[in-house]
Amino acid sequence: MAQTPASMLAAGKFIVDSRYATTEQEESILQDITARFPNVVLMKQTSQLRAMMTIIRDKKTPKEEFVFYADRLIRLLIEEALNELPFEQKEVTTPLDAPYQGVSFSSKICGVSIVRAGESMESGLRAVCRGCRIGKILIQRDEETAEPKLIYEKLPVDIRERWVMLLDPMCATAGSVCKAIDVLLKLGVKEERIIFVNILAAPQGIERVFKLYPNVRMVAAAIDVCLNSKYYIVPGIGDFGDRYFGTM
């Protein structure tokens, strides 16, 4: 019996080259991911969002334009991720001395960027969360084991009391983000208080994250269909950090 893209995804088999993926296959994979992983929030694919994604995906886009539209997209993504935080009822009085029943954040938050690409998302978080504390985690691949290795971390001392916005624009194999989540859990952060904020993800990465950490939440701007033989997301963006910081 022929396998559908969704059944191939569930079995750990993935399309290797997006050139061979039809629109129907792409839609099938996205539907399967959102159905199996309810903690994955995919931003509404509006024309504005797709236009910005088109610009930053284009290899001809110059650095200045790439950064401008990436920053716009990141801010929208952060705003979407803030919807995953807990709120509580709050009453205020308007300038007309009338009561208004509103809401406010009910918990402290902080950002944690996975160095280096994740640092590109820090200004977007600061722009919408004034005074938000931001920590950093540096993870590199161990040359002997090929496994992600923690090199450096500097995090708020009270991080276990906070909701954490974990920042990394790309989720390919998810090795780095899984290591970062492990670091946070060992410091006492509750799994359900980690919100992984991500511009672009591959099915393989999502599968790995939620197999290990089913209670984490993830907010993504887009999900592509696969990885290539070099473990880059395709169609993809390329190396986001290199393009953003101009180190290509």
Image (cartoon, rainbow, N blue to C red):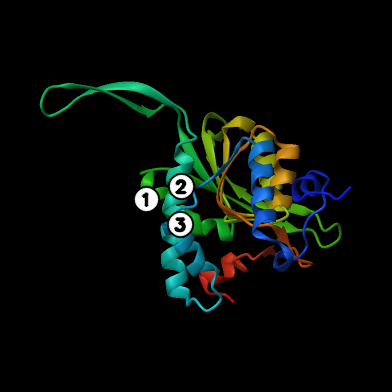
Q: Is residue 188 visible?
A: no
Q: Which residue is mark 3?
A: 49
Q: Which mark is residue 127?
A: 1
Circles 2 and 1: CB atoms closer than 8 Å: yes
Query: What amino acid does circle 3 point to?
Result: Leu
Residue under the point 45% across and 67% down = 67
Mark 2 vs mark 1, foreground winner is 2
Q: Which residue is mark 2?
A: 78
> In this image, 83 relative to 243: left or right?
left
Mark 1 closeness class: few <14, some 14–19, many ≥20 residues within 10 Å: few
Q: Identify the mark nearer the N-term, 1 or 3.
A: 3
Quadrant showing the C terminus: bottom right
Between residues 216 and 43, which one lies in front from this camera angle? Answer: 43
Query: What amino acid does circle 1 point to?
Result: Ala
- Disc 2 to disc 3, C-alpha distance: 14 Å
Q: Measuring from the top left, give residue 154's x and y in whole percent.
A: 58, 47
